[in-house]
């Protein structure tokens, strides 16, 4: 069995700052890496892979899933549900873009009353 690398602590701390903005979003330790949930719904999961690359998975709207799949690296579609996608993390990761993607993921997974409390760039209503 190949070992999975630990996600760099600096990255986990950065993700904690992003995720702490979301009401009732809690960190937990899954089978590998670190995840955040709202209720029982996973918002994001960051982990090191057996290939020694780091990934974060999150939820996206259906039309965005198709776009991510076609854009290719650093994005990918995974098999953990129809709206689950991911991003490879490295030293060149655009953390502002990732924060927006995680905001969208939270709003998809959260009950409406919680999602309405979150400011989403470019979304009115």
Image (spheres, rainbow, N blue to C red):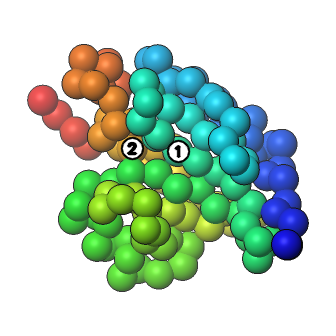
Q: Is residue 63 left or right of residue 46?
A: left
Q: Nearer the viewer, residue 12 or 80?
A: 80
Q: Which mark is residue 97?
A: none
The residue that label 2 is drawn on is: 105
Q: Where the C terminus falls, by quadrant?
A: top left
Give percent across and percent down for residue 77.
43, 71
Q: Is residue 4 left or right of residue 88?
A: right
Residue at 87%, 66% in the rendered image: 3
Residue 53 in sight in this render: yes
Q: Is residue 17 left or right of residue 85?
A: right
Above or below, 72 relative to 100: below
Residue at 28%, 25% in the rendered image: 111
Q: Nearer the viewer, residue 85 or 30?
A: 30
Above or below, 113 relative to 83: above
Residue at 43%, 60% in the rendered image: 80
| Label 1 or label 2, whichever comes before in sequence order | 1
Residue at 50%, 62% in the rendered image: 86
Between marks 1 and 2, how big is the CA–CA gap? Answer: 7 Å
The residue that label 1 is drawn on is: 44
Secondary structure of the residue carrying tag 2 is: helix
Above or below, 32 relative to 91: above
Q: Residue furthest front?
A: 1
Q: Nearer the viewer, residue 118 or 45?
A: 45
Q: Where the N terminus falls, by quadrant?
A: bottom right
Q: Nearer the viewer, residue 34 or 102?
A: 34
Give percent across and percent down for residue 116.
25, 22
Label 1 with label 2: CB-CB less than 8 Å: yes
């Amino acid at each position: 069995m190949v070992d999975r690398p630990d996600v760099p602590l600096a990255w986990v701390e950065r993700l904690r700052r992003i995720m702490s903005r979301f009401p009732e979003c809690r960190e937990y330790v899954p089978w590998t890496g670190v995840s955040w949930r709202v209720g029982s719904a996973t918002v994001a999961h960051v982990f090191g892979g057996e290939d020694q690359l780091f990934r974060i998975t999150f939820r996206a709207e259906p039309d965005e899933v198709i776009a991510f799949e076609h854009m290719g690296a650093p994005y990918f579609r995974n098999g953990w549900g129809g709206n689950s996608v991911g991003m490879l993390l490295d030293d060149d990761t655009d953390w502002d873009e990732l924060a927006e993607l995680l905001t969208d993921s939270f709003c998809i997974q959260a009950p409406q009353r919680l999602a309405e409390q979150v400011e989403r760039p470019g979304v009115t209503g």
